[in-house]
Amino acid sequence: MAHKLYIGTNTKMYKGISETCAYLSALGELTADIDRNECEIFVIPSFTTLESAYRQAQKAQVRLGGQNMGWEAAGQYTGEISPLMLREVGVEIVQIGHSERRQVFYEDDEMENRKVLCALQHGFTALLCIGETEKQKNFSLSGEVLRTQLKVGLQGVEPQDICRLWIAYEPVWAIGVNGKPAGKEYASQMHLLIRKTLEELFGRQAAKQIPILYGGSVNRQNADDLICMPDIDGLFIGRSAWDAEPFSEIIHHVLPHFQKCK
Ligand code: PGA
């Protein structure tokens, strides 16, 4: 298991350039006391903000991510953003397969797999998001769904790239304003299943190194409990992290809990 805490946010289709920069700058100030060797803080803002956000993120010691990426370096792919373009603006992390990409834009596991491989080949950290829908959960298919998303999504990942692979478990029913957070026991059960599947794919030692983050209605109230569960290495937060102050509060509360129980 990773012994560094991973905590970050995806700001979705909110926040333009000035808002993102102000947010990063405030977050940097509020978390200046946090040792980045102990806690990796990352922010994934919208594409149009990235060039301006880069300098702020550097100053704030926040790692910057892109919310999506095309799977070719260049070509006839209107509307897509290539790995070279993301590289140009200083992005380090690429988020792949967020449930909104899968549900609203019909991305499937094979597409996510192409993106994962392409992101890794271009030197990015690939953050693959997986999660079952409510219907799948009700049919007791969560395990099957997560295993498929991992086995297809990570097909062909080379051993030397595993150190740049992160997984976010985000049950679809837990995400967003209508979501209800997963209970800590359930989340931990799914994280264990994910870890076992990673072991199957990459071997025990390698699987241990891959951070598995929980996401879906994480907030100040449930963050401490979630982070103390086995196999939960970090938190991937939406709404509760979109203002720097409450996000910093969550980080400051979660880190000592994490250090005590891991
Ligand atoms: P939420 O979003 O924390 O607002 O539920 C999580 C996500 O979409 O990753």
Image (tube, rainbow, N blue to C red):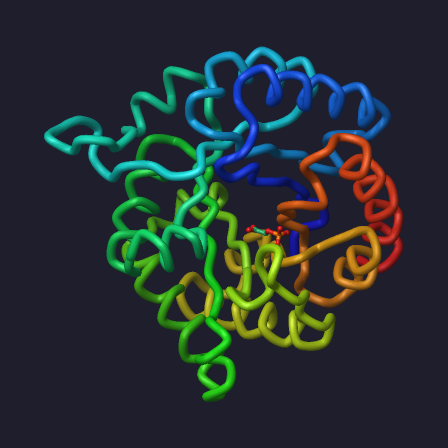
Identify which residue is drawn at 31% across, 52% down: 105
Where is residue 244, by image quadrant?
top right
Above or below residue 243? Residue 213 is below
Tell whether 45 sits left or right of 228: left
Nearest the eye: 199 or 177? 177
Q: Residue at 74% of width from left, 25% of height from top? A: 27
Q: Is residue 22 left or right of residue 196?
A: right
Work out whether 224 lies above or below 121: below
Give the position of the N terminus as an image quadrant: bottom right
Residue at point 38%, 21% (across, down) = 87
- x, y percent for residue 60: 70, 19
Query: Residue 174 sits in which quadrant?
Result: bottom right
Q: How many marks?
A: 0
Residue 258 placement (x, y as % from top left): 81, 52
- Between 135 and 163, which is closer to the camera in this rendering? 135
Residue 249 image point, x, y percent: 85, 39
Is 222 left, or right, of 21 in this rendering?
Answer: right
Choose between 253 and 40: the one closer to the eye. 253
Residue at the far bottom: name it: 139
Q: Nearer the viewer, residue 233 or 105?
A: 105
In the picture, the quarter occupied by the C terminus is: bottom right
User: Which residue is drawn at the image coordinates 54% and 34% (left, top)?
Assistant: 14
Q: Residue furthest front?
A: 178
Q: Answer left or right for 122 relative to 143.
A: left
Q: Where residue 10 sits in the image (x, y, percent)?
A: 56, 40
